[in-house]
Amino acid sequence: MFSKSKINEPGPKTAPEAEKAEKKEDKAPTMSEPSTPSTPKAKPPASVLSADLQITGNIKTTGDVNIEGNVKGDIRAHLLTVGEGATVEGECVADDVVVNGRVVGKVRGLKVRLTSTARVEGDIIHKTIAIESGAHFEGSVQRQEDPLNSKSAGMAPKPAPAAAEAKG
C-alpha cells in the first residue's frame, strides 16, 4: 500500500527535476507584465469631439484632442487639432496646436500651425509657428521659449510698483 506522506510530500529532487522546476519559474511574461522593461506603452487614440457636439466648459487632458464640433471654454491637451468646421471660443493650450477651423481666444503652444482654412481671432504665443497662405488671423503673435507656462503667458510683465501696492 501507499503512504500518504510519500504521495503528498515531495522527495529530494534529482538534477533533471531541479532544472525543470527552475525553468518553470523562468516562464515568459504574462499578459499583465510587459515583455521588456523598455517597451513603451501604446499611445491611446485621440479623443474626437464630433461635429454635432456642443460643449460648454473646459477640457483638460494629457492626450490628443480632435475638435470637430463647438466648444465654449478653455482647452488644454498634448496635441489639439481644431477641425475645419469646428469653432472654439476660449483659450487653446497644447504642445502642438493645429487650427483648421475657427478659434476666438488666445492660442498657446510650443508648435502652432494655422492651415489655409484657419480663422483665428486672438493672440498667439508660441515657440514655433507656421501660417499657411489663406489663413485669416487677427491678433498679435509673440514668441516665447516656454509658451505653456501660464506665468510667462502674459503679453508684458507686471510693473514692480503695482506688486508693491498690493502688499501694503
Image (cartoon, grey):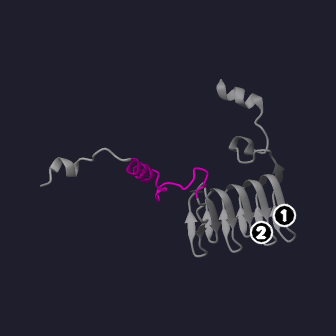
Does residue 33 belong to the magenta stretch? Answer: yes
| Point 72% across, 70% down: residue | 101
Measured Cα–Cα span from mark 1 to mark 2: 9 Å
Q: In the image, is residue 80 part of the stretch drawn in magenta? A: no
- Residue under label 2, please give it: 118
Q: Quadrant of residue 116?
A: bottom right
Q: How many marks?
A: 2
Is residue 44 shown left or right of residue 99? left
Q: Amino acid at mark 2?
A: Ala
Q: What secondary structure is marked by label 2? A: loop
Depth check, front residue: 45 or 87: 45
Q: Where residue 81 sits in the image (x, y, percent)?
A: 69, 65
Q: Residue at x 57, y 50 (%)?
A: 37
Give percent across and percent down for residue 49.
Answer: 59, 69
**Mark 2 Cα shell of 10 Å, populated few (<14), some (14-19), many (≥20):** many
- Asked which quadrant contains residue 46, the reply is bottom right
Residue at the right extreme of this rendering: 133
Where does residue 13 sit, x and y in percent of width and height?
A: 34, 46
Q: Nearer the viewer, residue 116 or 35?
A: 35
Indicate the quadrant containing the N terminus: top left, top right, bottom left or bottom right. bottom left
Residue at the (62%, 69%) spot, across then down: 70
Question: Which residue has dot 1 on it?
Answer: 131
Task: Identify the residue at the far left of this view.
Answer: 1
Q: Choose the circle earlier in sequence order: 1 or 2.
A: 2
Q: Is residue 36 left or right of residue 146?
A: left
Question: The magenta stretch spans which residues?
Answer: 15-41
Position of residue 26 measured from the top left corner of the image (x, y, whole percent) = 47, 51
Q: Is residue 39 left or right of residue 101?
A: left
Look at the image and tell me in which quarter the C terminus lies.
Answer: top right
Q: Amino acid at mark 1?
A: Ile
Taking 60 as reference, is 69 above or below it? below
